[in-house]
Amino acid sequence: MTAISSRGKVFRDPVHGLIRIEPGDEFVLDLINTPEFQRLRRVRQLGLSSLTYPGAEHTRFAHSLGVFNFAQRIIAVLKHRYADAKEVYTLLTGQERILKAAALLHDVGHGPFSHMIERAFEESANHEKKSTALIQDGGAITDCLQHHGFVPKEVANLILKASEHRFLVDIVSSQLDADRMDYILRDALNTGVKYGAFDSEWVVNSLCLGGEPGLNEKPRLQDLRLCLEDKRGLHSAEQLVMARMHMSYQVYYHRVTRGWEAHLLCLLKLAEESAKNDMLPKDTPSNVKAFLRGGDLTGDEWLWFDESAVEAAMHVWAGAQAVNAELAERSRTFLLRQKAFICAELGNLSMEQILRLSVGLNQSGRPNIDWLLDDPKFTTYKDFDSGFRGTKKEQDNAAVSTSAILISDGGLQSIARPAESVSLVLNALGDNPQGNRTSLSRLYYHKKVAESVEKVLAAVAPKRA
């Protein structure tokens, strides 16, 4: 066990200044020192965004430390606010270590290039599923947790949103969670996108609790949700939503970044096809080969399955024209940042146009290898409050509120409300989701199928060809 002096231990961090680990939290240092957590140093937070924003080289390791720090600060604020509320204070004190562990470990199962690889291999690269497996299915993290008196399943349950106490889950996963607060600020800082900033200090210090929206009775402990105080937290909620919106348009869904993601996604799907047909060069790293064949990587195979492993595979593929010329070309152009895929902005197509486009594209080339349809489902802000204004008796208020920013007066007997119910800004963004949705639908296609694809586009959507 790593010892911590009475002064605690600090990490310098560009977002938080100093991240403190207090005496009594030795388990945090021991978890950080596990091989599985150290692996996150070799997984970039924003995947391929550094090809567009050169400063975006920050890692899941740094982000995870930041999420831990926000989580422990949120816990401290709530404990201070509800020091006289015995049930709440006792629950927070009893669950504090579990909350800190879950916040720290929530991303430990991310594959190379973070969320990008999940788009290509949705099941085998699911980071949440892998994170919870690493926490409770054996290995160094499980051993570390058990050594410090944890029940690993309790940590995993918070990440899986399986706790009966909703506000504890909200600290780790919600519209006001520690994860979101850190990644928006960290991504904005490292990409240089200034309007991705928001007043996190005010957000944290405005946090409170309130009953689940839609309740018709006195809230029980398990009905409480994490909220912003309505008298002072509303403007920071608006700022948080606007920051995320700007980061989504300018960074997360940037046309050029998504183009390089399309290139790599198509490359990896081609590699997957080659692996199944035994056409991968023999020097392909064994863990990359196993992953492409659908294997569930464990032990050392997983520890070394990082971005350097995939890049090493591409180095091998790029030099193996005689074995697989197509895979060599895709790898070489990606590694040298030579544009091989063309982008067509699609906008809002009708259902008939989408069907015609799909038929034409399938005749032009292989889906997700020669072309990729990129249609992220992003809305500036969903009108969660509309669920509570509705008249349908079967309306599931709890489900509607899951993704809402909630506000409350902070009283434990109060019922929370979606922030847009009193915010002109959020109401304007959310009252007519379809009307204010900016289409980010794009088609990326390899230049070898350009002539055929562009004929399809000209026939289906002439203005976009």
Image (cartoon, helix red, strand yellow):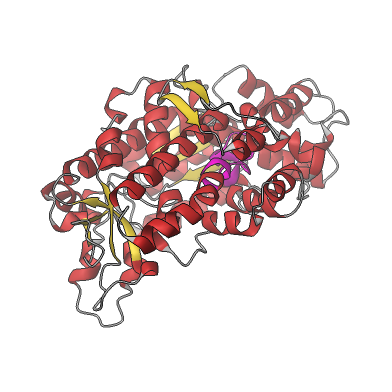
The answer to whether 396 is drawn above or below residue 382 in the figure is below
Find residue 117 and report its horizontal and vertical position in percent: 60, 41
Task: Judge by depth and name the residue closer to the eye, 455 or 249.
Answer: 249
Q: Is residue 200 left or right of residue 257?
A: left
Q: At 58% from the left edge and 54% from the top edge, which residue is drawn?
A: 155
Q: Nearer the viewer, residue 67 or 59?
A: 67
User: Can you name the residue that lies furthest to the right here?
Assistant: 282
Residue 279, quarter of picture: top right
Going 64% across and 27% down the picture, which residue do you hit? 42
Decide if residue 72 is on the left or right side of residue 450: left
List x then y, in percent, for residue 58.
Answer: 51, 24
Farthest-out residue, front: 6
Q: Is residue 342 visible?
A: no
Depth order, front residue of 198/70: 70
Confirm whether the magenta stretch covers residue 245: no
Residue 187, image x and y in percent?
42, 29
Is 397 drawn above or below residue 42 in the view shown?
Answer: below
Magenta highlight range: 102-118
- Name the residue: 13% across, 49% down: 231
Residue 249 figure quarter: top left
Specify whether residue 113 is painted magenta. yes
Q: Is residue 309 above or below residue 89?
A: above
In the image shown, does 359 or 116 lie closer to the viewer?
116
Q: Is residue 282 visible?
A: yes
Rendered-image quadrant of the N terminus: top right
Q: Quadrant of the C terminus?
A: top left
